Every structure is written in structure tokens, then in C-alpha cells.
Amino acid sequence: MSRVTRRIALGIGAAVTLALPLVLDSGQLSIYILLGLTAIVTVGLSMLMGYAGQVSLGQAAFYGIGAYTAGLLALHGWPPLIGLVAAPLAAALAALVLGVPLLRLRGHHLAFATLAMQLILLSIADNQAWMGGSIGLQGIPQLSLGSLEFDTDMSYAYVTWIALAGVVLTARNVIQSRPGRALRALATSEVAAESAGIPVGRYKLTVFALSAGFAGLAGGIYAFYLGYVSPGSFPILLSVGYVVMVVVGGLGTIWGALAGTAAVTLLVQLLNQLGTRDGVPGWLPSVLSYAVYAVLLIAVVLYLPRGIVPALVSLRRRADS
Amino acid sequence: MSDFLSYVLNGLAVGCGFALLASGLVTIHRVTGVVNFAQAMFAVVAGLTAGSALGAGLPHGAAELAGVAIAVIAGLLTGLAAVGRRGTTPQSALIVTLGVGILAYAVEIAIWGDQPRSFAGLPGSLEVGGVAIQWQYLLVIGVAAAVFAALALFFARTDRGKALTACASDPYGARLVGIDVLRMSLIAFALGGGLGGIAGVLVTPLQPISFDSDVALIVNGFAAAIMGGLNRPGPALAGGLLLGVAEALVAGYGNAAHQTEIALVLMLAIMIWRAVRTPVVQEETV
């Protein structure tokens, strides 16, 4: 694709996604919002997995940290905007602190370590009275900006859109900058990158914190949108789901993360609607969504190891030449 | 004092379960280089199958064997998905086993529902010095001891065991001397499935399991296996026992809610300690 067609495609994509909330009904609007929030997380995870070469099975923990930060601040009378700003900062800070020991690990060790991190945080949230224990935080007020109240699904759809756009822009700029090239180098070989003078440890930690910050931002919006967070809102399967979406779309590409998230979320929603019809056993929706996650993940890893979007791009290139 | 003794015994039994799971992880990892995320799924499948078999009127023993047999088949299928396709790297294989674990959720919920299930183990208990020890605990400990002894003999004394180890240390060299690496990998997965299955049928009477029990089980199994660097069964056994006893003591004297955190923090500490001591260069020679 040339630069111009890419710009046009981008413009059309933005216009369509901006117009969509106007025509969606309330059920579809909530899917739109959750899809957008998920995409914010997966763009960050895609950078972490694709560029820093690190697998995180605990990304939902940072989503949760953001949600709890925003929720707790709002419940203690702070202006919602402060909560929304603090959510990504708290998640990124947590990632910086936890990342110092955790990022000494790599490969399957890091995968298990991030999983363990999420389990520990969930267990802490479950047992702390000030975090609401297993019941969680209830009655989180609506997001507001001065006298402007965000009390409709539509307004949250646009908040989500703006947040996602900001995240995509940030990620794109980071990838195209000098640190972005350094990150690609360290994903291939840490030793080679290190000997070329790249501060490997610092860069990995920065991407880890950045991806956590994205997740925290999404979590903050989620807390205001639903008005309720509990440890049960952030299960391990949520983290696994993020990994599935990133792998399906293609590691290390922003568009891959967006496409993977949209494809998996919409497919699961579609099957959910089929599964909740009358006369269908109650266990069917969960069975179907697990099966979708699993089959997509296995098929893509085995047959399209670089993900759907990069595979389509190279197919196009081959057709063009 | 008798409290202490019963906590320790309880912990040893649970720890033997962790160690059996860990032994499956170790068997698969030392042969194929793959960390099998679906390892605890074998235990869940075996436990649930044994429960259903007992419900259908099969006697104890036969029901447990049926559970382990299903776990062996699950192991073989997992192996086919993870290493059956040539050129799958261990990293990709880890993600594939994660996928197999989720796929198993779908199958398990469709067959057994999403509620925890259990079945009665050996009834009665043994009285030793004023402490009552359930026979089931002793059974778990005894079976685990026998399995670990058999594993050690298998890897050290039999041709098949040595061939498996050869694949682990140098797949290319193993192929040169005529060892079918893919076949050995599948054998390792089947063996790993069986070991996970044994853990499952032994532990289910102690704590009810449901489809998503595998997360807690795999984390504990991995924590035990990591003590031996995922390659040696001996330290994995020690690690499992240590974890089991530590968790039982924390649950007994402190707060049961904190028992998994102990395992997790211990696992993180050991992994980071090992990582700090091993230079990066060693790990990249692939």
C-alpha cells in the first residue's frame, strides 16, 4: 500500500468507527465500548510481545490496577478526571516496580511469573477490606468533566474512542522512533542488542510500563463505565484472552492487535448470541467461547505463526509483484 | 504437637500431588524442551473421569485406572498438537499447550458442568501416637514414592529412558544414532499425561476439583518443577513436598487465604534467583 492509500484507509476507518455509535443499539454499544477497551490493552501487549519479545500472562492485572485506582479515588471524593489520569500512572508505576525483578526472567519463566503476579494481586484484592474484599467496589460515580456528565453509553463510546486513538498514536510513534528500532533489535537477540550499545534492561522495563499504562487507562474507563469492580472482573482467562487476540492478529503490529481484538471479540459475541437462544443448554455460550479462543489460538500459532494481518499483507505483496 | 504433625502429613500428601504434576512437566520438558501449560488439565480430566466412572458403578481401582488412561490419551493429543507439526519452536508450543488447556475447558464443561466435583477416597484412618492419619493421605504418599522410584529407574536404566534423555540433550545427535525424536516426544507427552492423571485421581478425594482448578494446580506444579530447573525429577519432588508442607502450615496456623501466595512468592523468588545466577548467553544458544 502506498502512503496515500494508507492515509485514506486510515481516514475511512476513523470515520466509520466514529459514526458507528450513532447507529448502534444499547447492547451493541456496550460491545463497542468493551471492544475498544480491550483493544487499548492489546495494542500495549502487542508491543510488549512483538517488540520486547516478552510474553505476559498477567496483563489483566494492570487492567485491574487501573480500575481499582480510578474506583477508589472516585469513591473517596476525588474528581473523576483525577482518577482517570491516575489509573494509567498507577498501573505503569506498578509495572516499573514489579518489572525490575520480573524482567530478569524470560520465555516461559516470565509467562509463569506474570501469571503468578496476577494471582497474588487478585488474592490481595480479595482479602483487603479497603479494596472491598471479594465483593469489590460498588457505586463508583460517573465520569464527569466540570459540569459535563458522561452518563450515556454513547459518551463512553467516544471516551473509549479517544483513548484508543491516543494509545494507537503513542504506540506508533514509539515504534517508529529510535527506541522502537532498538526494541526490535532486542527482540531478535538480547546479546547482540546489548553489544550494540542498547540499554536492554531499561528498554524492556519501559515497554513493560507503557503496556501496563495502556491497560491501566482501559481499566480506569471500565471502572467508570460499569460503576463496579471486583476481583472476579479480572480473571486469568482475561489475560489469556488478550494473548489470544494479539497472537491471532499478529505480534508487534498495531493493526494486528486491533484486527485480532475485533475478530475474536465479535466472533465470541456472535456465538454468545447463538448460544443464548431459547432451547439451548445454559452451558453452551461458555463452551463456545472457550472453544473459539482455543481453536483460533492453536490454528494461528501452528499455521499462521506471524498472525493474520502480517500474513494478509505478505499475500498482497506477492499478488502485487 | 499433634496439630503440627497432622498439618505436616496433610502437607506431605498434597505436596506429593504437586510433585507428581511436576514430574509430568519435567518429563515433557526434558525430552521436548516444551513447558506444558496443559499439564494440570490432565489431572483435572483424570479426576473428573474417575468420579464419573465410580458413579457409573465401576469399583475403586478400575475407575482410577480409567481416569489415568484418559489422561494418557489427553497427553498424547496435546503432544500431537504441540510438537506434531515440524518446526514448532518450544515457545510456540507453550502457546499451543495453553490453547489445548482452554479447549479442554470447553470439553470439560460440556461433559461435567462447571461445578466442583469430588469422590470418596480410601475410608478410615490410621492412629499413630495420638494422631489420626487418613488412609488416603498415606496412599498418596506411597504412590508418589513408587512413581518417583520407577521414573528414576526408567530414565537411568532402560534403553527407552536413555533414548528419551538423549533427545533432550541433543535432538540432532539423537536422530543421527537412529532415535525417532518425534516418537520419543509423543511418548514423553503420553507419560506426562499419565503422571498428571495419577496426581489427579489421588488428589480429587482430598480437594474437590472443577474445570478451572488447573490454574492453581499448574502454578504449584510449575513451582515445584522449577526447583530442578524443569529437568530433574529429584528436586521437583523435594520442591513439591516443601510447597505442600509450607502451605499446610500457613493454612493451619495462619490464614488459609494466604496459602497460594506462599507458593507463588516462593516460585518467583526461586526463578529470579536462578535467573540472576545464569548468564543470558547460556540461554540463547539455540
Image (spheres, coloured by chain):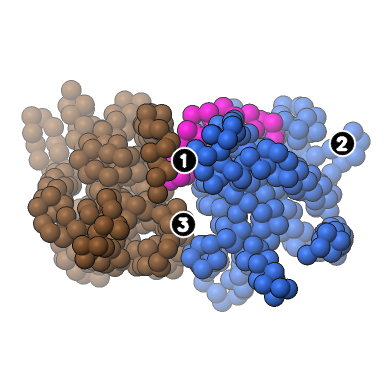
What residue do we see at 59% from left, 32% from top?
A: A197
Q: Is residue A73 above or below residue B220?
A: above
Q: CA distance from mark 1 to mark 3?
A: 14 Å
For label 3, the crowd category at 10 Å Cα-Cα, with few meaning under 14, some 14 to 19 and many 20 or more, is: some
Q: Are the numbered discs 1 and 3 placed on the same chain, yes or no? A: no
Q: Which residue is mark 1?
A: A106
Which chain does the blue colour mark? A
The picture's colour for chain B is brown
Q: Quadrant of residue A182?
A: top right
Q: Which residue is mark 3?
A: B92
Q: Quadrant of residue A112?
A: top left
For label 2, the crowd category at 10 Å Cα-Cα, with few meaning under 14, some 14 to 19 and many 20 or more, is: few
Q: Which residue is mark 2?
A: A145
User: Label 1 marks which chain's residue?
Assistant: A
Identify which residue, B162 or B173, lies in the foreground.
B173
Q: Is residue B50 visible?
A: no
Q: Secondary structure at mark 3?
A: helix
Identify which residue, A159 or B86, lies in the foreground.
B86
Residue range corresponding to the magenta coloring: A87-111
Q: CA distance from mark 2 to mark 3?
A: 46 Å
Please state the horizontal and vertical placement of residue A214, each as a whole percent of the image: 68, 41
Mark 2 touches mark 1? (CB < 8 Å): no
Q: Secondary structure at mark 1?
A: loop
User: Looking at numbered disc 2 in the image, what kind of residue is underneath it?
Assistant: Leu
User: Label 3 marks which chain's residue?
Assistant: B
Q: Are the numbered discs 2 and 1 placed on the same chain, yes or no? A: yes
Check the image and name the residue furthest to the right: A147
Q: Is residue A319 above or below residue A236?
A: below
